[in-house]
Image (cartoon, rainbow, N blue to C red):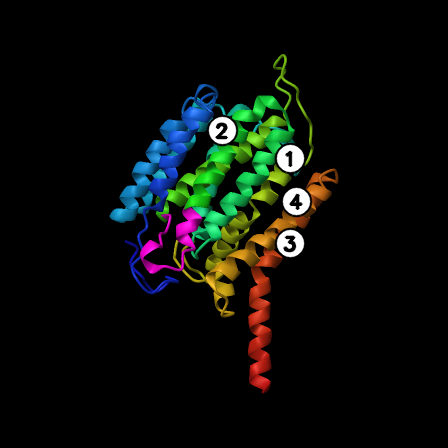
């Protein structure tokens, strides 16, 4: 059970092992409907099992941060080195194109670790992490489907993630206290890992590996489109770290500077806060798609600018309300 604390947005104990159900549905359905995944990516399932174990341990008896970090490094290494899922090319971002193997491995491992923890950070109100994971999986799944039959195992994986998250959201957003459940660290780490995996696989599609009989596509802005799809956890994590450093605090200190905390200060419900956040960042994804053929660095600037703007819009609204109330 998740005990309410100073930073909690709930007032009573809530069951927090929803991540186990998410793993169960993915672990059963993926080998049946997308068995090719475990041939193409040999360490994928092993990584999910490790994250399940660490997540459940952390949800039951809180683990030290360094132990979780070690597990995240292990699973990231398994997938990046063992399955060769890595960022090989930045398509001209900051003038960088093809990356050498060692730098590619290190950069990809760090990306996995950041995204795993970023999804853990946005899991602060009902429906946000689950709803955003659903949207990201749908966007990646549609993209894989449009890019050819070779990517169908990843399409099926995206559909399985959507199905498991939909079932979770049914209980996470339940109005009945006895039915309510949280995904816990188990769910957030699993979803963060899977979405990091699907985003890097998405970028990899547009790299010509000279594999016969497999069509290759080229989209110069592929890494930026992936960033746009995952913009919420990226911006939210960067924003809270910057604020903590400005305030001379440790980047790992907990606080209430997340985007969802700012919306709750406006007296919005969890559902409305989650909906507003998701729809705003969907607008950014749509803009990235429309501008996908523009200069990659210019597009990245626009995406990050709008991402950080969205993080501060609730703060501006709150400040205006405070000024208005003070005048009255």
Residue 81 magenta-drawn? Answer: no
Image coordinates of residue 82 in percent, x first then y, are 43, 22
Secondary element at tag 1: helix
Disc 3 target residue? 306
Q: Is residue 79 above or below residue 11?
A: above
Relative to 219, residue 21 above or below:
below
Crowding at label 2, few (<14), some or many (≥20) Cα neighbours within 10 Å? many
Q: Earlier in the sequence, mark 2 or mark 3?
A: 2
Please report contact status of discs 2 and 3: CB closer than 8 Å, yes or no. no
Q: Residue at x 33, y 65 (%)?
A: 11
Where's residue 131, x and y in %?
50, 49
Cα distance in 3D space between marks 4 and 1: 11 Å
Q: Residue at coordinates 51% horizontally, 60% vertically from top-left? A: 273
- Comparing 59 with 35, the one in front is 35
Kindly identify which numbered label has been placed on residue 222.
1
Q: Earlier in the sequence, mark 4 or mark 1?
A: 1
Residue receiving disc 4: 300
Which segment did they paint magenta?
168-183
Looking at the rendering, which quadrant does residue 199 occupy? top right
Gap between marks 2 and 3, in whole Å? Answer: 30 Å
1 vs 2, front mark = 1
Q: Secondary structure at mark 2?
A: helix
The structure residue drawn at horizontal position 46% and vertical position 34%, both measured from the top left corner, is: 109
Left or right for 318, reference 306: left
- Tell which tag, 2 or 3, sits nearer the viewer: 3
Q: Which residue is mark 2?
A: 105
Distance CA(mark 4)–CA(mark 2) = 22 Å
Identity of the residue furthest to the bottom in this view? 328
């Amino acid at each position: 059970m998740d005990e309410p604390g100073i930073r909690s947005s709930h007032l009573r104990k809530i069951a927090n092992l929803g991540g186990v159900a998410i793993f169960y549905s993915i672990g059963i359905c993926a080998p049946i409907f997308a068995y090719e995944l475990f041939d193409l990516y040999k360490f994928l399932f092993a990584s999910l099992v490790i994250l399940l174990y660490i997540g459940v341990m952390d949800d039951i008896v809180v683990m030290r941060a360094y132990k979780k970090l070690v597990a995240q490094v292990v699973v990231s290494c398994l997938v990046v080195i063992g399955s060769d899922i890595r960022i090989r090319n930045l398509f001209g971002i900051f003038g960088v194109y093809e990356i050498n193997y060692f730098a590619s491995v290190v950069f990809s491992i760090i990306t996995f670790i950041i995204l795993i923890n970023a999804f853990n950070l946005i899991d602060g109100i009902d429906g946000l992490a689950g709803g955003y994971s659903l949207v990201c999986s749908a966007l990646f799944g549609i993209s894989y489907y449009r890019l050819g039959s070779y990517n169908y195992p990843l399409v099926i994986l995206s559909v399985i993630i959507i199905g498991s998250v939909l079932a979770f959201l049914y209980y996470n957003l339940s109005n009945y206290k006895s039915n309510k459940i949280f995904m816990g660290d188990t769910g957030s780490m699993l979803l963060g890992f899977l979405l990091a995996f699907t985003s890097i696989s998405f970028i990899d599609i547009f790299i010509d590996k000279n594999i016969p009989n497999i069509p290759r596509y080229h989209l110069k802005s592929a890494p930026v489109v992936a960033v746009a799809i995952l913009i919420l956890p990226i911006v939210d994590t960067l924003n809270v770290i910057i604020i903590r450093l400005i305030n001379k605090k440790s980047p790992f200190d907990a606080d209430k500077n997340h985007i969802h905390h700012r919306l709750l200060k406006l007296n919005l419900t969890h559902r409305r806060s989650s909906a507003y956040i998701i729809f705003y960042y969907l607008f950014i994804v749509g803009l990235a798609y429309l501008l996908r053929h523009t200069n990659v660095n210019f597009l990245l600037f626009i995406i990050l600018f709008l991402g950080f703007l969205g993080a501060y819009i609730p703060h501006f609204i709150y400040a205006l309300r405070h000024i208005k109330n003070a005048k009255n």
